[in-house]
Image (cartoon, rainbow, N blue to C red):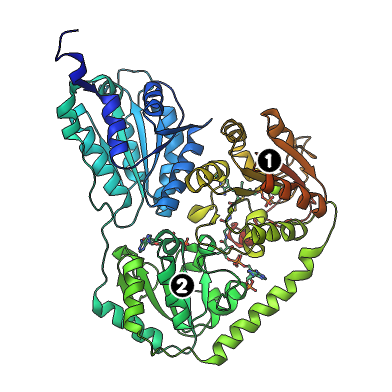
Amino acid sequence: EAPGTEQELTDGFHLVIDALKLNGINTIYNVPGIPITDLGRMAQAAGIRVISFRHEQNAGYAAGIAGYLTKKPGVCLTVSAPGFLNGLTALAHATTNCYPMILVSGSSEREIVDLQQGDYEEMDQLAIAKPLCKAAYRVLHAQDIGIGFARAIRAAVSGRPGGVYLDLPAKLFGQVMNAEAGQKSLVKVIDAAPAQIPSPASVKRALDVLKSAKRPLIILGKGAAYAQADEEIKSFVEKSGVPFLPMSMAKGLLPDTHPQCAGAARSTVLKESDVVMLIGARLNWLLSHGKGKSWGEAPKKFIQVDIEPKEMDSNVEIVAPVVGDIGSVVSAFNQAMGSGWTAPPAEWTNAVSSKREENVAKMAPKLMNNKSPMDYHGALGVLKNVIKDYPEAILVNEGANTLDLARGVIDMYKPRKRLDVGTWGVMGIGMGQAIAATLETGHPVLAVEGDSAFGFSGMEVETICRYNLPICVVIFNNDGIYRGTDVNGANSDPATTVFVKGARYDKMMEAFGGVGVNATSPDELKRAVNEAMASGKPTLINAVIDPAAGSESGRIGNLNPQSVLQKK
Ligand code: OXT
Ligand code: ADP
Ligand code: MG
C-alpha cells in the first residue's frame, strides 16, 4: 500500500459512529436490514451497545424511554420505508410525551425517490416524519454528518424535549472523505439543553399566589421527574407543606407514602383546592383539561411551571405562568421562600390526610384476599409488596384495568421508577420500555402487563432472553381486553374483545430459554415473582385473573362514545 492512501480515508459509516460516540451516545436500539446492517455491525465493533429488536416499534419505545431516563436522546435505527414507519409511531409517541429521541432511518436514493421511479423501499420519509416530530433533517454528504447529528441532538433535548428524525440515504454510508477532515467535521454539542432561568417577577408572582391559598395543591407531572431535580423538588414540597398529587409517571418523585402525598385523595384535592401549582404536568385529558365536574364548583387559580411557553393558557387561564426549566425554577422558589414560609391551614391538610387514610383503609382488605382465580386486587397486593421490598426495581405497566389498578395499588418510593403508557395511553410500550429501563439503569424490571397489552410487543421476550436481562413480566391474563366474558350473539366467531381462554403465555418465555410460571393464586404469584427478583433471570408469569373481574376501559370507560341509538 502506498503511504497516504487508504489509511487517511474515512466513510459515512464511521462518521456516524464517531459522531454518536463523541456525543456520549453509547447505545443504539435497532432492527437490522438494508441499508443499515453494516452500520450496526461496525457500531458494535466500535464499542457501542447495539440492541437488536424483533420489531422497530419496540426498538423505538426503548429509545424514547431511554431518553426519558437519561436526558440524552435515545437512538433508534431502522431500515427504509416499512422499518421507518414501524419506528415512526414510537417517534410520535416520544414527541407527545416530551421524551428526547432520535429516529435514524436509512432511506432510498433521492434521485429515484423524488422522481417516484420505484426504488427498493421507496418513500419520501423526511416529508412524512416532519409533522410527527419536533424536527426532521436529512444528510446528503459525509462532511455534513457531524453537523447533522449535532442538530438532531440539540433539537431533541433542548427546550421541551421530543422526537427528531434523521434521514440517512443509503449512498451516504459509502461516501469516503479524508479522515482528518472527517474528524474535524464532527461536532461535540456544547450545553445541549441550556438552563432556562425563570424571570424573578414570575417566581415572585407564583409564590404570592401560592401563599394566598387556603387550600393549595401541587401537581407533579412526568416533566418534573424528567428534570432530575429530585432534591430541589423534595425540599420545595416539604418546605411549602402543600399536599402534592403525582401524575402516573411522577409517582415516587417523593414517595407515595409521604405524609403530604394526596394520590389516594385525588378527587377530593382536585375538587376542593383553591390554588393549583402544576410542575411539569399539562392540563390535558388526564387532568380533565382543568375544568368541569372533576374540578368542582369553587373558583380555582392555576400556577404553571413549564419549559414550554406555549403550554400556558392551553386550556384555562394560568394566573402565574413560570417559564423555565424545572431545576432552575424550583431552586429559585426555594431561595425566594427563605425560611419563613407558613404552612397551609391545618384544616385543609388534615382534611386531605383523613380522606387519604380513609381510601387506603378501604383498599387494604381487598389486597389481602387469596382468591383463585385471582382478582386484580389480590394479585396487585402481592406486587405492591414486591416493589416495597425492591424499591430500586423499575415498574413498567400497561393495560386497561391492569394499568389503572396497578397505578393506585403499587406505591412507588423513588423517582423515575414507574414507566407506563404515557399521554396517549398506548398499548405496546411494555417490552421495549422494560428492555431499555434495565439496560440504561442497571436495575431489574417488573413489567405488569394486561394480556392484550403484552400482545403488542410480546415477541420481544426473545430479545429479553437473548440479552439475558433481569426482567420479570407478569401477565394479568383475564382472557381478553377489559374482560374475557363477552359473547358474540351473531355467529360462531369469538366476541371482538376476547382471546383464547386459558392461554399459557408462560410457555412463550420457555420457548426461548427463560423461566415460565403459571400462577393461579396470590401465593403462587408471590413465590414466582420473588424467585424472579432474587435470580434476575428472564421470567414470565402467567397470572390467571378472573375473566369477569375487570371493567370496560378500566377507569376511563366514560371516554367511550355513547349514542341513544346504541344497539349491541
Ligand atoms: O379519589 P377517588 O375517590 O376518586 O379515588 C381515586 C384515588 O384517590 C384512589 N387511590 C387510592 N386509594 C387507596 N389507596 C391508594 N394507594 C390509592 N391511590 C389512588 O383510587 C382512585 C383512582 O385513582 P387514580 O387512578 O389516580 O384516579 P383516576 O380517577 O383513575 O385518574 C384519572 C386518570 C385519567 C388520570 C387515570 O385514570 C389515568 O391515568 N388513566 C390512564 C388510562 C389509560 O391511559 N389507559 C390506557 C388506554 S385504555 C384503551 O385505550 C385500551 N386499548 C385500546 C388501544 C390502545 N390503548 N393502544 C393501542 C395502540 N391500540 C389500542 C386496548 C387494546 S386498553 C387496551 C387493552 C386492555 O386489555 P388488557 O388485557 O391489556 O388489560 P385488562 O383491562 O386488564 O384486561
Ligand atoms: P403528565 O402526563 O405526567 O401530566 P405531561 O407529559 O403532560 O406530564 O407534561 C410534561 C410537561 O413537562 C410538558 O409540558 C413539558 O414541556 C414539561 N417539561 C419537560 N421537561 C421539562 C423541564 N426540564 N423543565 C420544565 N418543564 C419540562
Ligand atoms: Mg386483559
Instruction: Specify the amino acid type for callout 2.
Output: Lys
| Location of residue 355 with respect to 167 vertically, above or below | below
Instruction: Name the foreground residue: 423 vs 158.
Output: 158
What is the x, y in percent for residue 509? Answer: 69, 34
Q: Quadrant of residue 460?
A: top right
What is the x, y in percent for residue 489? Answer: 78, 43
Query: Is disc 1 in contact with disc 2, using a CB cutoff of under 8 Å?
Result: no
What is the x, y in percent for residue 289? Answer: 46, 68
| Local SS, label 1 | strand
Closer to the chain start, of discs 1 and 2, is 2
> Is the N terminus in the top left, top right, bottom left or bottom right quadrant?
top left
Label drawn at residue 234: 2
Q: Is residue 233 left or right of residue 427?
A: left
Q: Quadrant of residue 174?
A: top left
| Local SS, label 2 | helix
Ligand 2 is found in the corner quadrant, namely bottom left
* Residue at the image position 78 percent from the left and 48 percent from the top: 485
| Location of residue 315 with respect to 459 vertically, above or below | below
Please tell me how crowded label 2 is: few (under 14), some (14-19), or many (20+) other residues with Cα within 10 Å: some
Q: Is residue 388 left or right of residue 25?
A: right
The residue identified by callout 1 is 539
What is the x, y in percent for residue 533? Answer: 67, 48
